Amino acid sequence: MPAPAPGRTVLDARDITRALTRISHEILERNKGASDLILLGLHTRGVPLAHRIADGIAAVEGVPVAVGELDVTMYRDDLRSQPTRRAHKTQLPSGGIDGKVVVLVDDVLFSGRTIRAALDAVSDLGRPAAVRLAVLVDRGHRELPIRADHVGKNLPSARSERVSVRLAETDDLDEVTIS
Amino acid sequence: MKHLLSIDDLSVDDIGAIFDTAAEMHDVQRRDVKKLPALRGRTIVNMFFEDSTRTRSSFEIAGKWLSADVINVSAKGSSASKGESLRDTVLTVCAMGVDGLVIRHPASGAAHQVSQWVDAVVVNAGDGTHEHPTQALLDAYTLQRRMGSLEGRHVVLVGDLTHSRVFRSNVLCLTKLGARVTVVAPPTLMPAGIDSWSRAVGFETSYDVDQVLPQADAVMMLRVQRERMSGAFFPTAREYTVGYGLTRNRLALLGPDVPICHPGPMNRGLEIAADAADAAQSVVLEQVSSGLAIRMSVLYHLLAGEEA
């Protein structure tokens, strides 16, 4: 059994499942179906979230949705002020992203800088018809004019607080805490 | 890690991190837009005091694909040819605000010496007969992609060991990654003192290529460096080929899946027959594309992070 995270639990496993189910429905509704849809999970925890949303969409529509992985390490604007980060895998569904509706999936939306980097990365990879953003938690404190299209939970937080997302795929349990 | 001067500077974890990033860089080579912004605003100077095609262009493309500004300085056409000392040339270039220096020099230890003089990150792109760390990294990376792990795999290096910096970096890198390494050369091209070095590092030596090749999981042919030879190291080129070249007959001693590496440039017909160089199991061109990925990775790890 994994050790409990410090702080207050704001989403438990059932809350996360419900939020992701709702996001799956919202994406389908906005896209008017699952055609030409690609979910791109941002490393690290965006990837399992993208897969779960894809499963949710498949359960409703009965068709599989393409899922890819996006690593934005090289596109970050803080590379020079941090120790070197290890790059992860970027993997697109076969056929690429040209002309597709790409939904970026991440766990927490905070300053918006990761999403800015992701938008740069996406534009290097192809030219999607549209790019949307789905996040499990939006904690505010944006530093760039970026907002999410689909939000699991809006979580007002102080800048000094720490929001931790743990997922079964990476951390052995589903939980969002704030401390 | 501030500089990359020798494979000895790297831990197994460092090499793993370089390989992981290189795998991502490899994917970039297949993209329409072969550009990442990671080194935007950084300036890298390639200083090549020896002729080179693949290493220099590989470092140049690697830097450019990472969005660094890259310029090339070669001995011919630079003030070095007017008699300027290495120290003055390097300090002059660095006074222009350079972040990284990639240096190739005919003197062993030149890169280490340069790293003492400058604040910029120094990458050794070959110093005399001492080391060529990025070549060893790209060789090990190429073999690892072909064979999975190098742990326990038998890699055989054949050729002019005395004059080879590639050999020195490679035995350090391959043994560090757990490979069993055997080096083969005629007695005249076996470096002095190799016995104690082989015991310290943990590799084997042999004079008999025909005996070793059938046990190889991978073979690496090394160039006969005639430009570094001041004396006669073997009677004739023909005799070297008969004794140590990877000829058509010796190719038959290798399994069909045993990768054949050569750091290039190849002396076809001398150390490697055209049949072997062009064989399906030859990974010579794969080494070149791996080299680009490895150099992108090395430049990223050395230059992207926190400023010193």
Image (spheres, rainbow, N blue to C red):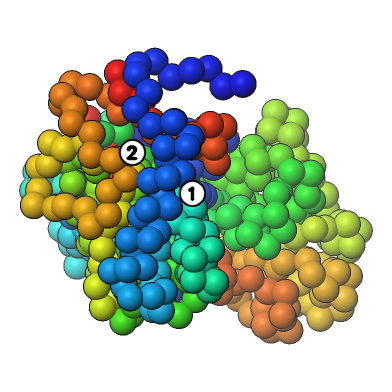
Q: Are marks 2 and 1 on the same chain?
A: yes
Residue B262 percent coordinates (x, y): 62, 67
CB-based contact (under 8 Å), mark 2 and mark 1: no
Q: In the drawing, does residue B83 fall left or right of residue B305? A: left
Q: Is residue A111 above or below residue B139?
A: above
Q: B192 or A44, which lies in front?
A: A44
Q: A100 or B295, which lies in front?
A: A100
Q: Earlier in the sequence, mark 2 or mark 1?
A: 1
Q: In the drawing, does residue B62 fall left or right of residue B9? A: left
Residue at mark 2 to residue at mark 1: CA–CA distance: 24 Å
Q: B79 or B148, which lies in front?
A: B148
Image quadrant where residue A28 sits = bottom left
Q: Which residue is mark 2?
A: A84
Asked if one can make out residue B280 in the rendered structure from this viewpoint, the answer is yes
Mark 2 Cα-neighbour bin, 10 Å: few <14, some 14–19, many ≥20: some
Image quadrant where residue B224 sits = bottom right
Q: Which residue is mark 1?
A: A48
Residue B80 percent coordinates (x, y): 21, 56
Residue type at mark 1?
A: Pro
